[in-house]
Structures are given as structure tokens and as C-alpha cells.
Image: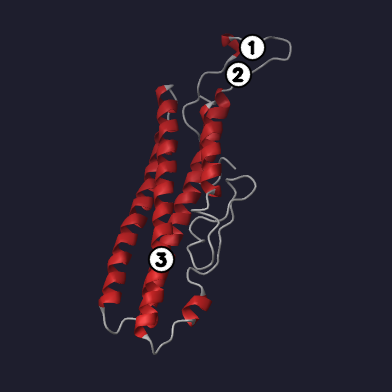
């Protein structure tokens, strides 16, 4: 089943390079999952602020309508990109799940990796629910006559927490892909330099990959 790993690695690589997740200006949630590095799986987390200080500075405290107009544009931009990131991570999780299912069908014990994948997918689902709650909070803020830039800090903080959740999901996916590699590697044929490969020189599948989360596949 080693032939499935390169496909998965390529998929994750291009997912991380997507402008939706990586190449976003400061005023947008660039910190969602980080900008892709050369290897695709070793991306650096972006630590730029979720909200550009310069944009907030343009909102005049004496003009509530201007404040809300700016905040609406900002929140719309943020929510669209956060939502796109959640959906993309969901698709990546499903692709990983497909690979695990094929490994399991071939006789490999994927119990541990299945559990780790489910935990990561659950976190991604929690992030989506958090975004829905944040959207409700924002609508309440806009509906309030006194709502303005100064009241946006709580929503900004909540978005920061979602950002951390999504970064955690991405890290979990990267670890799972690494463990997939270590699980598949032992199933490769052992080739003697003097003997042509044959079914008799192929090791049987190894049941599962050992090692704690975060220490294997790197």
C-alpha cells in the first residue's frame, strides 16, 4: 500500500500552499495554518495579528456607522477565510481516512491512527461550531446601537482561539501522515543485491506503527 502515501503527501502539500490557507494579508486570518514551507509538511505558523492595527486605527470613535461598516467588511473577510480553512482541513482529513481504510483492508492495524484522526477531525468540527457562535456574537454586536470597534476585542480574541484550534488540527494531520509513512515503510520488499525480488523476499505487513504522538514520522 506504499503507493498511496505519495498521493497523500502531494495532496497535503498543495493544500498547504493554497492561497486560502497561506498567502493571506495581515488583515485576514493568515495565521490559520501557516505559510507553506519548501517541503509542504514543515510549514511555519504565521504569527501576524488577526486584525491589522492600521485598519482599526482608521475607524473614528466618533463615527459609529463608519466603525460598523469597517468591522463588517473585516469580519466578512475573516469569516470567509476561516470557513474555507475549516472546509479544506475537513477534506484533508477525509483523504487521510481513505488511505487508512485501504491500509486496514490490506491487513494493517490502523486502530491507533484511526483514533488520532478522529480526534483531529473532532477538533476541526469544534472550530466550525465556534465560528458559528462567533458569527452570532458579531450579529448581536452590530445590532447594538452602542456596538463599535472597542467592543470587537472579545470577538477578535475568540477568532484567535479558533486559529489555535486549526493550527492544532494541521499539526495532528502532519503527525498522522508521518506515522503513515513509518507504518507503510516496513512493508517494502527486502531486496538482496544478489537475488531478484520475489514474493518470498517480501516481508508481511506490520500491524500498526509504534511511537508516541509527535515523536514518529519525523
The residue to which callout 2 is attached is 189
Q: Tag on residue 197?
A: 1
Q: Nearer the viewer, residue 180 or 215?
A: 180
Q: How many marks?
A: 3
Q: Is residue 89 left or right of residue 39?
A: left
Is residue 212 in view from this perspective?
no
Please report contact status of discs 2 and 1: CB closer than 8 Å, yes or no.
yes
- Residue found at x 53% / y 78%: 54
Q: Residue furthest bottom?
A: 62
Q: Nearer the viewer, mark 3 or mark 1?
A: 3
Q: Secondary structure under badge 2? A: loop
Please report contact status of discs 3 and 1: CB closer than 8 Å, yes or no.
no
Is residue 67 in view from this perspective?
yes
Q: Separation of disc 3 and disc 2 at Cα?
A: 48 Å
Q: Separation of disc 3 and disc 1 at Cα?
A: 55 Å
- Residue found at x 50% / y 55%: 33
Residue 164: x and y in percent read: 45, 60
Q: Tag on residue 159?
A: 3
Mark 1 surroundings: few (<14), some (14-19) or many (≥20) residues within 10 A: few
> Quadrant location of residue 127?
bottom left
Which of disc 2 and disc 3 is earlier in sequence? 3
- Residue found at x 39% / y 45%: 90
Amino acid at each position: 500500500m506504499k503507493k498511496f502515501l505519495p498521493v497523500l503527501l502531494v495532496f497535503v502539500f498543495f493544500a498547504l500552499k493554497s492561497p486560502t490557507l497561506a498567502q493571506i494579508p495581515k488583515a485576514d486570518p493568515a495565521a490559520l495554518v501557516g505559510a507553506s514551507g519548501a517541503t509542504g509538511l514543515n510549514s511555519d505558523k504565521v504569527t501576524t495579528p488577526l486584525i491589522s492595527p492600521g485598519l482599526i486605527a482608521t475607524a473614528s470613535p466618533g463615527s459609529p456607522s463608519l466603525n460598523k461598516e469597517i468591522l463588517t467588511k473585516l469580519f466578512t473577510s475573516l469569516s470567509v477565510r476561516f470557513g474555507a480553512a475549516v472546509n479544506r482541513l475537513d477534506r484533508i482529513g477525509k483523504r487521510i481516512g481513505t488511505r487508512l481504510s485501504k491500509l486496514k483492508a490490506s491487513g494493517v492495524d490502523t486502530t491507533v491512527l484511526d483514533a488520532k484522526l478522529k480526534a483531529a477531525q473532532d477538533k476541526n468540527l469544534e472550530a466550525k461550531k465556534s465560528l458559528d457562535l462567533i458569527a452570532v456574537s458579531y450579529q448581536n454586536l452590530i445590532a447594538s446601537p452602542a456596538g463599535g470597534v472597542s467592543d470587537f476585542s472579545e470577538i477578535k480574541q475568540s477568532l484567535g482561539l479558533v486559529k489555535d484550534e486549526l493550527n492544532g488540527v494541521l499539526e495532528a494531520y502532519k503527525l498522522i501522515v508521518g506515522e503513515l509513512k513509518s507504518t507503510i515503510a516496513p512493508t517494502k520488499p527486502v531486496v538482496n543485491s544478489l537475488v531478484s525480488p520475489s514474493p518470498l523476499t517480501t516481508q508481511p505487513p506490520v500491524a500498526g506503527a509504534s511511537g508516541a504522538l509527535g515523536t514518529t514520522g519525523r
